[in-house]
Image (cartoon, rainbow, N blue to C red):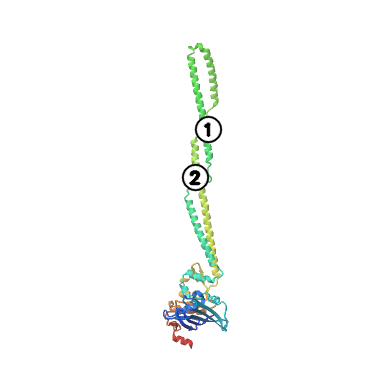
Amino acid sequence: MPISYLRINNYMRVENVEFNPKGGLNEITGANGAGKTSTLSALATMGGKKEIAWKPIRDGAEEATIEIHVDGIGTAQIRIVRKFWTDKNGRQAESLIIESADGARFPSPQNMMTGWLGAFAFDPLAFTRMDAKEQAEILKRFVPDFDFNAIDKKNREDFETRTDVNRSAKDLRARVGGIIVPADTPDEPIDESALVEELQSAGAHNSDIEKRKANRQSLQRDIDQRADGVGRSHAKIDELKQQISAIEESITVDEGWISEQKTRLAKAGALPTPIDQSAITAKINAARTINVHVTRKIERADLTKKADAAEAESIALTAAMDARKKEKAEAVRKAKMPVDGLEFGDDMVLFNGQPLDQASQAEKIRVSVAIAAAMSPKLKVAIIKDGSLLDKKSWALLEQFAIEHDLQVFVETVDSTRPTAIVIEDGSIRQEQALEAAE
């Protein structure tokens, strides 16, 4: 549905602009401040309230009117009128009417306009100057059944989680590396209590030996003392004859006792060999050292297990993120793009496999015009505010692609000399052009 008629009265700097737009390029030119920007802004207001100027009514006027006619079904025309005025309370008021040629009005006019002009303010030339991220955001509109925000949100969450997991894994690996354990360290600690019990048993054993040894030494001293007594007794026999009987009896008793004790000593056998306690003490000290190593080995194994788990979780998160990226790429691949060869991903837009910002100017214009046409499938209209930046070749390409896509493009330039340009002077079309349009 092309725009066949446009009339603007008292909108911003425009006093009166009225003409019949043609297919392809419609150049709006003039000096700065003449009203050409206001002309395009008036046209953009049809797209929705967000395009309406803060002060839409021209100074000195009571109301502003924007009227366009578009070709409807068959030869019938649809008339669209948006008006602005100040109500009795001094507040800005507005209305939007859409009616058929026979005067029948359509309900919910703004919803209709939004459906017709979903991206009315889309500027194909501005698209070529956007960075890849901004371009990708626009192209997401052509994949309507895919929730990019949900995928991006999940990937951001997993990315943050993976960052924490990787940091934890790195910390665990560092702690593992800081634990030095001898290669021959056993997996289980040595039972120090058993060795201590063994040491205590050996001490008791040796103490008993020392006690028995002392008893024997004491007994030997007694034997020696009594033997000395026997000797003295024999020496005094002559002197103590009168005591011989008593002494002999005593001797007999002592000799009997001596014999008995000698027999006892003979039967006692050799003392057991003392246990070397220093060897057991060395074992205990060695066990304690080994057990320290075992504890560190167990700690290192635990940290290694945790690090392995963290790294595995990181790999799983990466796989999930990659899967979502593939899902997103597949959704984009299956979507119908405005032009063949156009695809996009995160912060990148490709055309025929190459970054769009590396494409030729002709390819950029071709792609942007195709996007503009696709974004306004019913009322194929686009607005370009920086048309003065186009050289002759780019202008010709823009016009060619606009015609190919059946797209009406309203282009703002400054003081253009092209004979087809509509010149705005002091808020109106130049007089001779206005007269030609009226004829």
Q: Residue 28 appears at what percent x and percent y? A: 45, 80
Q: Earlier in the sequence, mark 1 or mark 2?
A: 1
Residue occupying the point 52% across, 48% down: 298
Q: Is residue 136 above or below residue 433?
A: above
Label 2 sits on residue: 292
- Indicate which disc residue 232 carries: none
Q: Which residue lies furthest to the bottom in this view?
A: 439
Name the residue nearer the viewer: 264 or 214: 214
How busy is the neighbourhood of tag 2: few (under 14 within 10 Å), some, or many (20 plus)? some
Callout 2, which amino acid?
Val
Q: Residue 132 appears at what percent x and percent y? A: 47, 69
Q: In this view, does 419 lie to the left or right of 96?
A: left
Q: Residue 237 appears at what percent x and percent y? A: 49, 13
Residue occupying the point 51% across, 12% down: 243
Look at the numbered discs 1 and 2 and tell me whether their residues touch, using CB distance below 8 Å.
Answer: no
Residue occupying the point 47% across, 53% down: 174
The answer to whether one can see residue 353 in this image is no
The answer to whether one can see residue 233 in this image is yes
Name the residue nearer the viewer: 93 or 328: 93
Secondary structure, mark 2, is helix
How many marks can you see? 2
> Which quadrant: the N terminus?
bottom right
How busy is the neighbourhood of tag 1: few (under 14 within 10 Å), some, or many (20 plus)? some
* Disc 1 from disc 2: Cα separation: 31 Å
Name the residue nearer the viewer: 183 or 334: 334
Callout 1, which amino acid?
His
Label 1 sits on residue: 205
Q: Residue 34 appears at what percent x and percent y? A: 43, 80
Secondary structure, mark 1, is helix
Residue occupying the point 46% across, 86% down: 434
